[in-house]
Image: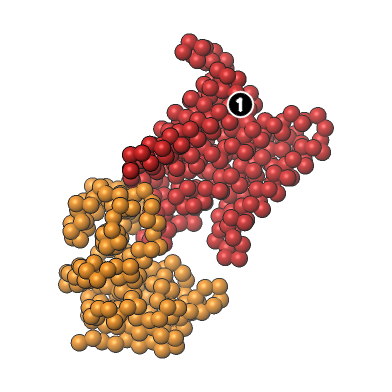
Chain colours: A red, B orange
Protein backbone atom coordinates (compact mmCIF):
# COMPACT_ATOMS: atom_id res chain seq x y z
CA UNK A 1 0.00 0.00 0.00
CA UNK A 2 2.76 2.41 0.89
CA UNK A 3 4.43 1.61 -2.44
CA UNK A 4 1.16 2.51 -4.11
CA UNK A 5 0.85 5.80 -2.28
CA UNK A 6 4.47 6.42 -3.08
CA UNK A 7 3.56 6.69 -6.75
CA UNK A 8 1.91 10.03 -6.08
CA UNK A 9 5.34 11.48 -5.33
CA UNK A 10 5.95 11.68 -9.05
CA UNK A 11 4.39 14.63 -10.82
CA UNK A 12 3.98 12.66 -14.05
CA UNK A 13 1.92 10.07 -12.20
CA UNK A 14 -0.27 12.76 -10.67
CA UNK A 15 -0.77 14.24 -14.11
CA UNK A 16 -1.62 10.83 -15.54
CA UNK A 17 -3.98 10.14 -12.64
CA UNK A 18 -5.93 13.38 -13.06
CA UNK A 19 -6.09 13.25 -16.85
CA UNK A 20 -6.81 9.53 -16.94
CA UNK A 21 -9.59 9.66 -14.37
CA UNK A 22 -11.37 12.49 -16.16
CA UNK A 23 -10.96 10.85 -19.56
CA UNK A 24 -12.22 7.52 -18.22
CA UNK A 25 -15.33 9.22 -16.84
CA UNK A 26 -16.12 11.08 -20.07
CA UNK A 27 -15.36 8.12 -22.29
CA UNK A 28 -17.56 5.78 -20.27
CA UNK A 29 -20.56 8.12 -20.27
CA UNK A 30 -20.34 8.94 -23.96
CA UNK A 31 -19.67 5.28 -24.64
CA UNK A 32 -23.13 4.36 -23.37
CA UNK A 33 -24.67 6.40 -26.18
CA UNK A 34 -22.28 5.00 -28.78
CA UNK A 35 -22.71 1.37 -27.78
CA UNK A 36 -26.50 1.57 -27.51
CA UNK A 37 -26.81 3.19 -30.92
CA UNK A 38 -24.54 0.49 -32.34
CA UNK A 39 -21.97 3.14 -33.19
CA UNK A 40 -19.21 1.75 -30.97
CA UNK A 41 -16.76 1.58 -33.86
CA UNK A 42 -16.90 5.37 -34.28
CA UNK A 43 -14.54 5.81 -31.34
CA UNK A 44 -12.14 3.30 -32.86
CA UNK A 45 -12.19 5.16 -36.18
CA UNK A 46 -11.66 8.50 -34.44
CA UNK A 47 -8.66 7.21 -32.52
CA UNK A 48 -6.97 6.17 -35.75
CA UNK A 49 -7.73 9.53 -37.31
CA UNK A 50 -6.22 11.21 -34.25
CA UNK A 51 -3.14 9.05 -34.63
CA UNK A 52 -2.74 10.23 -38.22
CA UNK A 53 -3.05 13.89 -37.27
CA UNK A 54 -0.71 13.51 -34.26
CA UNK A 55 1.89 11.98 -36.56
CA UNK A 56 1.56 14.75 -39.12
CA UNK A 57 1.69 17.39 -36.39
CA UNK A 58 4.92 15.85 -35.08
CA UNK A 59 6.43 15.90 -38.55
CA UNK A 60 5.38 19.51 -39.11
CA UNK A 61 6.56 20.51 -35.65
CA UNK A 62 3.11 21.79 -34.61
CA UNK A 63 1.73 21.21 -31.09
CA UNK A 64 -0.19 17.91 -31.68
CA UNK A 65 -3.43 18.91 -29.92
CA UNK A 66 -3.87 21.98 -32.12
CA UNK A 67 -4.02 19.80 -35.19
CA UNK A 68 -5.59 16.66 -33.78
CA UNK A 69 -8.60 18.32 -32.09
CA UNK A 70 -9.99 20.02 -35.21
CA UNK A 71 -9.18 17.06 -37.46
CA UNK A 72 -10.93 14.61 -35.11
CA UNK A 73 -13.99 16.85 -34.88
CA UNK A 74 -14.22 17.08 -38.66
CA UNK A 75 -13.77 13.31 -38.94
CA UNK A 76 -16.50 12.66 -36.36
CA UNK A 77 -18.99 14.86 -38.18
CA UNK A 78 -17.99 13.26 -41.48
CA UNK A 79 -18.58 9.76 -40.10
CA UNK A 80 -22.04 10.81 -38.88
CA UNK A 81 -22.92 12.24 -42.29
CA UNK A 82 -21.69 9.06 -43.97
CA UNK A 83 -23.92 7.04 -41.65
CA UNK A 84 -26.90 8.92 -43.05
CA UNK A 85 -25.75 8.26 -46.58
CA UNK A 86 -27.52 5.23 -48.00
CA UNK A 87 -24.89 4.58 -50.66
CA UNK A 88 -21.87 4.12 -48.41
CA UNK A 89 -22.29 1.75 -45.52
CA UNK A 90 -21.32 3.22 -42.13
CA UNK A 91 -19.09 0.27 -41.16
CA UNK A 92 -17.21 0.37 -44.42
CA UNK A 93 -16.75 4.12 -44.23
CA UNK A 94 -15.23 3.88 -40.75
CA UNK A 95 -12.92 1.04 -41.82
CA UNK A 96 -11.69 3.05 -44.81
CA UNK A 97 -11.14 6.14 -42.68
CA UNK A 98 -9.37 4.16 -39.93
CA UNK A 99 -6.83 2.33 -42.01
CA UNK A 100 -6.14 5.29 -44.30
CA UNK A 101 -5.35 7.61 -41.38
CA UNK A 102 -3.22 4.94 -39.75
CA UNK A 103 -1.31 4.44 -43.00
CA UNK A 104 -0.87 8.16 -43.60
CA UNK A 105 0.37 8.65 -40.04
CA UNK A 106 2.88 5.80 -40.24
CA UNK A 107 4.09 7.03 -43.62
CA UNK A 108 4.51 10.58 -42.32
CA UNK A 109 6.58 9.38 -39.36
CA UNK A 110 8.75 7.01 -41.41
CA UNK A 111 9.58 9.76 -43.90
CA UNK A 112 11.15 11.88 -41.18
CA UNK A 113 14.24 10.46 -39.59
CA UNK A 114 14.95 10.50 -35.89
CA UNK A 115 11.41 10.51 -34.49
CA UNK A 116 10.79 6.79 -34.67
CA UNK A 117 10.38 6.38 -30.92
CA UNK A 118 7.18 8.40 -30.99
CA UNK A 119 5.28 5.91 -33.06
CA UNK A 120 5.10 3.41 -30.21
CA UNK A 121 3.93 6.10 -27.82
CA UNK A 122 1.10 7.09 -30.11
CA UNK A 123 0.04 3.56 -30.89
CA UNK A 124 0.24 2.09 -27.41
CA UNK A 125 0.24 5.16 -25.19
CA UNK A 126 2.65 6.56 -22.66
CA UNK A 127 1.97 8.41 -19.45
CA UNK A 128 5.31 10.16 -19.84
CA UNK A 129 4.02 12.03 -22.86
CA UNK A 130 1.66 14.24 -20.82
CA UNK A 131 2.86 17.71 -19.84
CA UNK A 132 1.28 20.38 -17.66
CA UNK A 133 -0.40 22.07 -20.58
CA UNK A 134 -2.05 18.77 -21.52
CA UNK A 135 -3.29 18.38 -17.98
CA UNK A 136 -4.90 21.82 -17.94
CA UNK A 137 -6.51 21.32 -21.36
CA UNK A 138 -7.78 17.90 -20.28
CA UNK A 139 -9.30 19.25 -17.08
CA UNK A 140 -11.08 22.07 -18.89
CA UNK A 141 -12.35 19.90 -21.74
CA UNK A 142 -13.45 17.07 -19.46
CA UNK A 143 -15.44 19.52 -17.38
CA UNK A 144 -17.07 20.83 -20.57
CA UNK A 145 -17.90 17.26 -21.61
CA UNK A 146 -19.35 16.38 -18.20
CA UNK A 147 -21.43 19.56 -17.90
CA UNK A 148 -22.79 19.30 -21.46
CA UNK A 149 -23.59 15.64 -20.86
CA UNK A 150 -25.50 16.26 -17.64
CA UNK A 151 -27.44 19.16 -19.15
CA UNK A 152 -28.47 17.29 -22.27
CA UNK A 153 -28.89 13.94 -20.51
CA UNK A 154 -32.66 13.56 -21.04
CA UNK A 155 -32.46 14.56 -24.68
CA UNK A 156 -29.52 12.20 -25.19
CA UNK A 157 -31.59 9.39 -23.69
CA UNK A 158 -34.56 10.10 -25.95
CA UNK A 159 -32.53 10.20 -29.12
CA UNK A 160 -30.45 7.17 -28.17
CA UNK A 161 -33.57 5.14 -27.44
CA UNK A 162 -35.70 6.21 -30.41
CA UNK A 163 -34.41 8.82 -32.81
CA UNK A 164 -37.65 9.18 -34.81
CA UNK A 165 -39.72 9.80 -31.70
CA UNK A 166 -37.18 12.30 -30.39
CA UNK A 167 -37.36 14.13 -33.71
CA UNK A 168 -41.16 14.16 -33.61
CA UNK A 169 -41.12 15.90 -30.21
CA UNK A 170 -39.04 18.67 -31.73
CA UNK A 171 -35.59 17.74 -30.46
CA UNK A 172 -32.94 18.95 -32.87
CA UNK A 173 -31.50 15.51 -33.46
CA UNK A 174 -28.78 16.62 -35.88
CA UNK A 175 -27.55 19.20 -33.39
CA UNK A 176 -27.28 16.66 -30.58
CA UNK A 177 -25.64 14.11 -32.86
CA UNK A 178 -22.97 16.66 -33.67
CA UNK A 179 -22.56 17.49 -29.98
CA UNK A 180 -22.03 13.78 -29.24
CA UNK A 181 -19.55 13.52 -32.11
CA UNK A 182 -17.58 16.55 -30.90
CA UNK A 183 -17.54 15.36 -27.29
CA UNK A 184 -16.32 11.94 -28.44
CA UNK A 185 -13.54 13.33 -30.55
CA UNK A 186 -12.33 15.59 -27.73
CA UNK A 187 -12.32 12.70 -25.28
CA UNK A 188 -10.49 10.42 -27.66
CA UNK A 189 -7.86 12.94 -28.70
CA UNK A 190 -7.15 13.73 -25.05
CA UNK A 191 -7.06 10.14 -23.91
CA UNK A 192 -5.16 8.78 -26.86
CA UNK A 193 -1.71 9.81 -25.74
CA UNK A 194 -1.99 8.00 -22.49
CA UNK A 195 -3.96 4.98 -23.71
CA UNK A 196 -2.64 4.76 -27.25
CA UNK A 197 -4.54 4.95 -30.52
CA UNK A 198 -5.13 1.22 -30.59
CA UNK A 199 -6.50 1.00 -27.06
CA UNK A 200 -8.44 4.21 -26.31
CA UNK A 201 -11.72 3.05 -27.83
CA UNK A 202 -11.94 0.31 -25.20
CA UNK A 203 -12.58 3.00 -22.58
CA UNK A 204 -15.83 3.88 -24.35
CA UNK A 205 -17.00 0.32 -24.89
CA UNK A 206 -16.05 -1.97 -21.97
CA UNK A 207 -17.73 -0.13 -19.04
CA UNK A 208 -21.07 0.07 -20.85
CA UNK A 209 -21.04 -3.58 -21.92
CA UNK A 210 -20.23 -4.64 -18.36
CA UNK A 211 -22.89 -2.41 -16.81
CA UNK A 212 -25.59 -3.70 -19.15
CA UNK A 213 -25.30 -7.11 -17.49
CA UNK A 214 -26.66 -5.90 -14.19
CA UNK A 215 -28.34 -2.51 -14.78
CA UNK A 216 -31.91 -2.46 -15.98
CA UNK A 217 -32.38 1.23 -16.65
CA UNK A 218 -30.49 3.89 -18.56
CA UNK A 219 -29.54 6.10 -15.63
CA UNK A 220 -27.99 3.19 -13.76
CA UNK A 221 -26.06 2.09 -16.84
CA UNK A 222 -24.57 5.59 -17.20
CA UNK A 223 -23.69 5.93 -13.51
CA UNK A 224 -22.33 2.40 -13.22
CA UNK A 225 -20.24 2.84 -16.39
CA UNK A 226 -18.70 6.00 -14.98
CA UNK A 227 -17.88 4.33 -11.65
CA UNK A 228 -16.58 1.10 -13.21
CA UNK A 229 -14.44 3.00 -15.66
CA UNK A 230 -12.86 5.08 -12.88
CA UNK A 231 -12.18 2.05 -10.69
CA UNK A 232 -10.67 0.08 -13.58
CA UNK A 233 -8.50 3.05 -14.45
CA UNK A 234 -7.16 3.40 -10.91
CA UNK A 235 -6.42 -0.34 -10.64
CA UNK A 236 -4.85 -0.36 -14.11
CA UNK A 237 -2.62 2.61 -13.37
CA UNK A 238 -1.52 1.06 -10.07
CA UNK A 239 -0.66 -2.25 -11.75
CA UNK A 240 1.22 -0.38 -14.41
CA UNK A 241 3.20 1.48 -11.73
CA UNK A 242 3.88 -1.57 -9.54
CA UNK A 243 4.96 -3.92 -12.30
CA UNK A 244 6.29 -1.36 -14.80
CA UNK A 245 3.64 -2.59 -17.25
CA UNK A 246 2.38 -0.47 -20.17
CA UNK A 247 -0.39 1.79 -18.81
CA UNK A 248 -2.90 1.59 -21.64
CA UNK A 249 -2.68 -2.18 -21.87
CA UNK A 250 -2.98 -2.59 -18.08
CA UNK A 251 -6.18 -0.52 -18.00
CA UNK A 252 -7.73 -2.44 -20.89
CA UNK A 253 -6.87 -5.78 -19.31
CA UNK A 254 -8.45 -4.75 -15.98
CA UNK A 255 -11.56 -3.74 -17.94
CA UNK A 256 -11.54 -7.07 -19.76
CA UNK A 257 -11.20 -9.06 -16.53
CA UNK A 258 -14.13 -7.16 -15.01
CA UNK A 259 -16.24 -7.80 -18.11
CA UNK A 260 -15.46 -11.52 -18.10
CA UNK A 261 -16.15 -11.84 -14.37
CA UNK A 262 -19.47 -10.05 -14.76
CA UNK A 263 -20.44 -12.33 -17.62
CA UNK A 264 -19.50 -15.36 -15.50
CA UNK A 265 -21.49 -14.15 -12.48
CA UNK A 266 -24.41 -13.33 -14.76
CA UNK A 267 -24.35 -16.82 -16.28
CA UNK A 268 -24.20 -18.49 -12.87
CA UNK A 269 -26.92 -16.38 -11.24
CA UNK A 270 -29.42 -16.51 -14.10
CA UNK A 271 -29.33 -20.28 -14.39
CA UNK B 1 -65.86 20.47 -36.19
CA UNK B 2 -62.32 21.78 -35.89
CA UNK B 3 -59.72 20.68 -38.46
CA UNK B 4 -56.47 19.62 -36.82
CA UNK B 5 -54.35 18.75 -39.83
CA UNK B 6 -54.96 19.51 -43.48
CA UNK B 7 -53.10 17.48 -46.10
CA UNK B 8 -53.14 19.13 -49.49
CA UNK B 9 -51.91 17.55 -52.76
CA UNK B 10 -49.11 15.93 -50.81
CA UNK B 11 -46.20 14.20 -52.53
CA UNK B 12 -43.79 12.21 -50.37
CA UNK B 13 -40.79 10.01 -51.04
CA UNK B 14 -37.09 9.44 -50.59
CA UNK B 15 -34.14 10.37 -52.80
CA UNK B 16 -36.35 11.61 -55.65
CA UNK B 17 -38.33 8.38 -55.63
CA UNK B 18 -41.94 9.20 -54.90
CA UNK B 19 -44.00 6.90 -52.71
CA UNK B 20 -47.15 8.96 -52.28
CA UNK B 21 -48.39 11.27 -55.00
CA UNK B 22 -51.17 13.83 -54.75
CA UNK B 23 -52.83 12.85 -51.49
CA UNK B 24 -55.38 15.20 -49.91
CA UNK B 25 -57.44 14.71 -46.76
CA UNK B 26 -58.39 16.45 -43.53
CA UNK B 27 -58.04 15.24 -40.00
CA UNK B 28 -60.89 16.60 -37.86
CA UNK B 29 -60.87 16.84 -34.12
CA UNK B 30 -62.30 13.64 -32.65
CA UNK B 31 -61.57 11.54 -35.73
CA UNK B 32 -60.35 7.97 -35.45
CA UNK B 33 -58.82 7.30 -38.85
CA UNK B 34 -57.58 3.84 -39.80
CA UNK B 35 -55.06 3.98 -42.64
CA UNK B 36 -55.22 0.82 -44.73
CA UNK B 37 -52.93 -0.29 -47.49
CA UNK B 38 -50.61 -2.96 -48.84
CA UNK B 39 -46.93 -3.07 -47.95
CA UNK B 40 -45.15 -0.44 -49.98
CA UNK B 41 -48.26 1.69 -50.43
CA UNK B 42 -46.63 4.41 -48.35
CA UNK B 43 -48.33 4.05 -44.98
CA UNK B 44 -45.18 4.56 -42.93
CA UNK B 45 -44.04 7.29 -45.30
CA UNK B 46 -47.29 9.14 -44.68
CA UNK B 47 -46.70 8.92 -40.92
CA UNK B 48 -43.19 10.28 -41.31
CA UNK B 49 -44.60 13.12 -43.37
CA UNK B 50 -47.28 13.92 -40.78
CA UNK B 51 -44.66 13.97 -38.02
CA UNK B 52 -42.34 16.19 -40.00
CA UNK B 53 -39.59 13.56 -40.12
CA UNK B 54 -39.43 13.93 -43.90
CA UNK B 55 -40.20 17.00 -45.95
CA UNK B 56 -42.92 16.96 -48.63
CA UNK B 57 -41.62 16.84 -52.21
CA UNK B 58 -44.68 18.81 -53.25
CA UNK B 59 -47.97 19.92 -51.75
CA UNK B 60 -48.28 20.78 -48.09
CA UNK B 61 -49.41 19.79 -44.63
CA UNK B 62 -51.01 22.53 -42.54
CA UNK B 63 -51.19 22.07 -38.79
CA UNK B 64 -53.87 23.67 -36.63
CA UNK B 65 -52.24 22.22 -33.53
CA UNK B 66 -48.67 22.25 -32.26
CA UNK B 67 -46.81 19.96 -34.66
CA UNK B 68 -44.46 18.86 -31.88
CA UNK B 69 -47.37 17.74 -29.76
CA UNK B 70 -48.48 14.89 -31.95
CA UNK B 71 -48.03 11.72 -29.91
CA UNK B 72 -46.17 9.22 -32.07
CA UNK B 73 -46.14 5.51 -31.43
CA UNK B 74 -43.65 3.68 -33.69
CA UNK B 75 -43.80 0.01 -34.64
CA UNK B 76 -42.72 -1.97 -31.64
CA UNK B 77 -40.12 -3.84 -33.71
CA UNK B 78 -38.36 -0.57 -34.59
CA UNK B 79 -37.39 -0.11 -30.96
CA UNK B 80 -34.40 -2.00 -29.56
CA UNK B 81 -35.82 -4.56 -27.17
CA UNK B 82 -32.54 -4.98 -25.28
CA UNK B 83 -32.08 -1.31 -24.61
CA UNK B 84 -31.57 -0.84 -20.87
CA UNK B 85 -34.37 1.54 -19.97
CA UNK B 86 -37.09 1.53 -17.34
CA UNK B 87 -40.73 2.00 -18.31
CA UNK B 88 -40.80 5.29 -16.41
CA UNK B 89 -37.73 6.63 -18.24
CA UNK B 90 -39.33 5.85 -21.60
CA UNK B 91 -42.75 7.31 -20.79
CA UNK B 92 -41.21 10.42 -19.23
CA UNK B 93 -39.24 11.05 -22.42
CA UNK B 94 -42.61 11.70 -24.07
CA UNK B 95 -42.82 14.94 -22.09
CA UNK B 96 -39.65 16.28 -23.71
CA UNK B 97 -41.63 18.49 -26.07
CA UNK B 98 -42.78 20.50 -23.03
CA UNK B 99 -39.26 20.89 -21.68
CA UNK B 100 -37.80 23.21 -24.33
CA UNK B 101 -34.40 24.54 -23.34
CA UNK B 102 -34.69 23.41 -19.72
CA UNK B 103 -32.21 20.59 -19.03
CA UNK B 104 -34.42 18.67 -16.59
CA UNK B 105 -38.06 17.67 -16.13
CA UNK B 106 -40.18 19.57 -13.60
CA UNK B 107 -42.57 17.93 -11.15
CA UNK B 108 -45.57 18.60 -13.40
CA UNK B 109 -44.03 16.60 -16.23
CA UNK B 110 -43.07 13.77 -13.89
CA UNK B 111 -46.64 13.69 -12.60
CA UNK B 112 -47.94 13.62 -16.16
CA UNK B 113 -45.81 10.56 -16.94
CA UNK B 114 -47.28 8.73 -13.93
CA UNK B 115 -50.81 9.73 -15.01
CA UNK B 116 -50.20 8.32 -18.49
CA UNK B 117 -49.08 5.05 -16.91
CA UNK B 118 -52.27 5.03 -14.85
CA UNK B 119 -54.48 5.75 -17.87
CA UNK B 120 -53.12 2.61 -19.54
CA UNK B 121 -53.27 0.60 -16.31
CA UNK B 122 -49.55 -0.10 -16.29
CA UNK B 123 -48.40 1.92 -13.27
CA UNK B 124 -47.31 -1.37 -11.70
CA UNK B 125 -44.68 -1.67 -14.45
CA UNK B 126 -43.20 1.76 -13.71
CA UNK B 127 -39.81 0.48 -12.58
CA UNK B 128 -39.67 -2.59 -14.81
CA UNK B 129 -37.09 -2.89 -17.51
CA UNK B 130 -38.43 -2.49 -21.06
CA UNK B 131 -36.66 -5.67 -22.20
CA UNK B 132 -38.40 -7.84 -19.61
CA UNK B 133 -41.93 -7.00 -20.76
CA UNK B 134 -44.22 -8.96 -23.05
CA UNK B 135 -45.03 -7.67 -26.55
CA UNK B 136 -48.41 -6.32 -25.46
CA UNK B 137 -46.90 -4.56 -22.45
CA UNK B 138 -44.19 -2.97 -24.59
CA UNK B 139 -46.88 -1.64 -26.95
CA UNK B 140 -48.67 -0.06 -24.01
CA UNK B 141 -45.45 1.55 -22.82
CA UNK B 142 -44.89 3.10 -26.26
CA UNK B 143 -48.52 4.23 -26.30
CA UNK B 144 -48.12 5.76 -22.83
CA UNK B 145 -45.09 7.67 -24.10
CA UNK B 146 -47.08 8.95 -27.09
CA UNK B 147 -49.89 9.94 -24.73
CA UNK B 148 -47.41 11.83 -22.58
CA UNK B 149 -46.36 13.81 -25.65
CA UNK B 150 -49.81 14.96 -26.71
CA UNK B 151 -52.92 16.70 -25.54
CA UNK B 152 -55.05 15.90 -28.55
CA UNK B 153 -53.63 13.77 -31.36
CA UNK B 154 -52.07 10.29 -31.54
CA UNK B 155 -50.38 8.76 -34.58
CA UNK B 156 -49.87 4.98 -34.36
CA UNK B 157 -47.78 2.90 -36.76
CA UNK B 158 -49.10 -0.68 -36.97
CA UNK B 159 -49.75 -1.07 -33.24
CA UNK B 160 -51.37 -4.47 -33.71
CA UNK B 161 -48.29 -6.06 -35.26
CA UNK B 162 -46.87 -9.09 -33.46
CA UNK B 163 -49.67 -9.18 -30.93
CA UNK B 164 -51.66 -12.31 -30.17
CA UNK B 165 -55.45 -12.13 -30.41
CA UNK B 166 -56.10 -11.31 -26.75
CA UNK B 167 -53.46 -8.60 -26.46
CA UNK B 168 -54.75 -7.11 -29.70
CA UNK B 169 -58.31 -6.94 -28.38
CA UNK B 170 -57.09 -5.44 -25.14
CA UNK B 171 -55.03 -2.88 -27.00
CA UNK B 172 -57.96 -1.82 -29.19
CA UNK B 173 -60.14 -1.48 -26.11
CA UNK B 174 -57.61 0.96 -24.68
CA UNK B 175 -57.60 2.93 -27.94
CA UNK B 176 -61.40 3.13 -27.92
CA UNK B 177 -61.28 4.43 -24.39
CA UNK B 178 -58.79 7.13 -25.39
CA UNK B 179 -60.91 8.08 -28.40
CA UNK B 180 -63.97 8.43 -26.20
CA UNK B 181 -61.97 10.75 -23.95
CA UNK B 182 -61.67 13.06 -26.95
CA UNK B 183 -58.32 12.17 -28.49
CA UNK B 184 -57.94 12.25 -32.25
CA UNK B 185 -56.30 9.04 -33.48
CA UNK B 186 -54.65 8.10 -36.76
CA UNK B 187 -53.72 4.43 -36.91
CA UNK B 188 -51.93 2.49 -39.62
CA UNK B 189 -52.72 -1.15 -40.07
CA UNK B 190 -52.53 -3.82 -42.73
CA UNK B 191 -54.64 -6.49 -41.11
CA UNK B 192 -58.18 -5.21 -41.23
CA UNK B 193 -59.55 -8.71 -41.66
CA UNK B 194 -58.49 -9.80 -38.21
CA UNK B 195 -60.53 -7.26 -36.32
CA UNK B 196 -63.52 -5.00 -36.63
CA UNK B 197 -62.93 -1.44 -37.71
CA UNK B 198 -62.87 0.67 -34.58
CA UNK B 199 -62.49 4.11 -36.10
CA UNK B 200 -65.00 6.41 -37.73
CA UNK B 201 -63.04 6.76 -40.98
CA UNK B 202 -60.83 4.62 -43.17
CA UNK B 203 -58.19 6.08 -45.42
CA UNK B 204 -57.48 3.61 -48.22
CA UNK B 205 -53.94 3.98 -49.39
CA UNK B 206 -53.48 1.94 -52.56
CA UNK B 207 -51.21 2.77 -55.44
CA UNK B 208 -52.64 5.84 -57.21
CA UNK B 209 -55.99 5.30 -55.56
CA UNK B 210 -56.54 7.21 -52.36
CA UNK B 211 -59.95 7.53 -50.84
CA UNK B 212 -61.44 8.33 -47.46
CA UNK B 213 -64.37 6.19 -46.38
CA UNK B 214 -66.71 7.09 -43.55
CA UNK B 215 -67.69 4.21 -41.30
CA UNK B 216 -71.17 4.19 -39.87
Would residue A247 be visible to someone looking at this image? Answer: yes
Asked where in the image residue B74 lies, by quadrant, the reply is bottom left
The answer to whether B33 appears left or right of A228 in the picture is: left
From the image, tell me which residue sits under label 1: A246
Which of A135 and A241 lies nearest the eye of the viewer? A241
Query: Which quadrant is home to the C terminus of chain A?
Result: top left
- Residue drawn at x 25%, y 64% is B151
Asked where in the image residue A106 lies, by quadrant, the reply is top right
Q: Residue furthest top?
A: A2
Which of B50 and B175 lies nearest the eye of the viewer? B175
Which of B46 and B141 lies nearest the eye of the viewer? B141
SS of the residue under disc 1? loop
Is the residue A208 above or below the residue A18 in the image?
A: below
**How many numbered marks have been drawn onto this rendered protein structure?**
1
Q: Position of residue B47 (x, y in %)?
A: 39, 72
Would residue A74 be visible to someone looking at this image? Answer: no
The answer to whether A97 appears left or right of B60 in the picture is: right
- Residue drawn at x 69%, y 44% is A102
The answer to whether B12 appears left or right of B98 in the picture is: right
Q: Position of residue B112 (x, y in %)?
A: 22, 54
Label 1 neighbour load within 10 Å: few <14, some 14-19, many 20+: some
- Residue drawn at x 22%, y 69% is B166
Is the residue B174 above or below the residue A235 in the image?
A: below
- Residue drawn at x 63%, y 38% is A197
Q: Position of residue A225 (x, y in %)?
A: 42, 37
Is the residue B189 above or below the residue A98 in the image?
A: below
Q: Position of residue A144 (x, y in %)?
A: 48, 38
Is the residue B151 above or below the residue A30 in the image?
A: below
Given the image, what chain letter belongs to the residue carrying mark 1? A
Which of B158 and B89 lies nearest the eye of the viewer? B158
Amino acid sequence: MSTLLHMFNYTFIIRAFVVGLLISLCAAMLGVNLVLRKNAMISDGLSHVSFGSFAIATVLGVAPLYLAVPVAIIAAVAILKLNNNHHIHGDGAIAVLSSSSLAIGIMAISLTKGVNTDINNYLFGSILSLNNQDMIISIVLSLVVLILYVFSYHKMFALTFDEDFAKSTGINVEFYNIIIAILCSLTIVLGMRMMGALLISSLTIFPCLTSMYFCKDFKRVVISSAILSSICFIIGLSISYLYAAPTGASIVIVNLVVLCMTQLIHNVTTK
Amino acid sequence: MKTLIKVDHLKLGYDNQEVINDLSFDIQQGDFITVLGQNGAGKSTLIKGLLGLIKPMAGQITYYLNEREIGYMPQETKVDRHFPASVYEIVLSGALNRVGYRPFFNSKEKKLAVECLKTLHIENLKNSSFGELSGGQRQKVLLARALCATRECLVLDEPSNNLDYDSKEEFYAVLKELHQKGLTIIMITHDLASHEVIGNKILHLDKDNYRMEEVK
